[in-house]
Amino acid sequence: MIGDGIYHCVKYVHNFDPNVYKKPHAFISKICERAFVQRIKKDKRLDAVRYKHFTNQVFDIDMVENNQIDYNIYLDINKKVYEYENQPYMLKNKKPKKTEHQCLYEVDETNTTTIIEELIANYTEDED
């Protein structure tokens, strides 16, 4: 994590403008803080992927029966995955599933065939 902070400081220190910013220490501290936050988010995401893989692919109920793993550990892993997937910033980035197209106005289904027939008749008359 400290390495990430140093890496980002070296990478972005060229953006420091002494005419705009008066405190170089604050600029560098902010770069480090953002690097730490990004590292923590990345680690949480990777942990959630590992836990989800374990629960979906590796875990088997026979492991509990053979005393290879405690069932409470399995429940704890599921809880961590659930908490990660339901964080507020995770939910706002998810796009809603596409549903049927909703019409902005009401359409009378019985009258649509006559409207279409009228349009076809008008189109054919215009061609003649």
Image (spheres, rainbow, N blue to C red):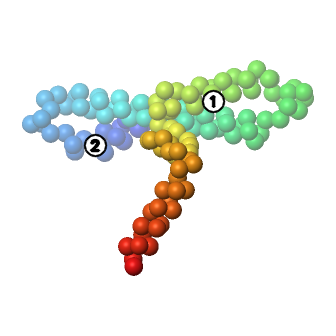
Above or below residue 65? Residue 111 is below
Q: Is residue 44 left or right of residue 36?
A: right
Q: Position of residue 61 (x, y in %)?
A: 85, 31
Q: Which residue is mark 1?
A: 81
Q: Position of residue 105 (x, y in %)?
A: 44, 41
Image quadrant in which the N terminus is located: top left
Picture mark count: 2
Q: Is residue 110 left or right of residue 71?
A: left
Q: Earlier in the sequence, mark 1 or mark 2?
A: 2
Q: Amino acid at mark 1?
A: Val
Query: Quadrant of the rendered structure where residue 77 is?
Result: top right
Residue at 51% in and 62% down: 117
Whether residue 118 is visible to the viewer of this picture, yes or no, is yes
Residue at 9% in and 36% down: 19
Query: Front-most of 111 and 82?
Result: 111
Query: Front-most of 81 and 36?
Result: 81
Q: Is residue 80 left or right of residue 23?
A: right
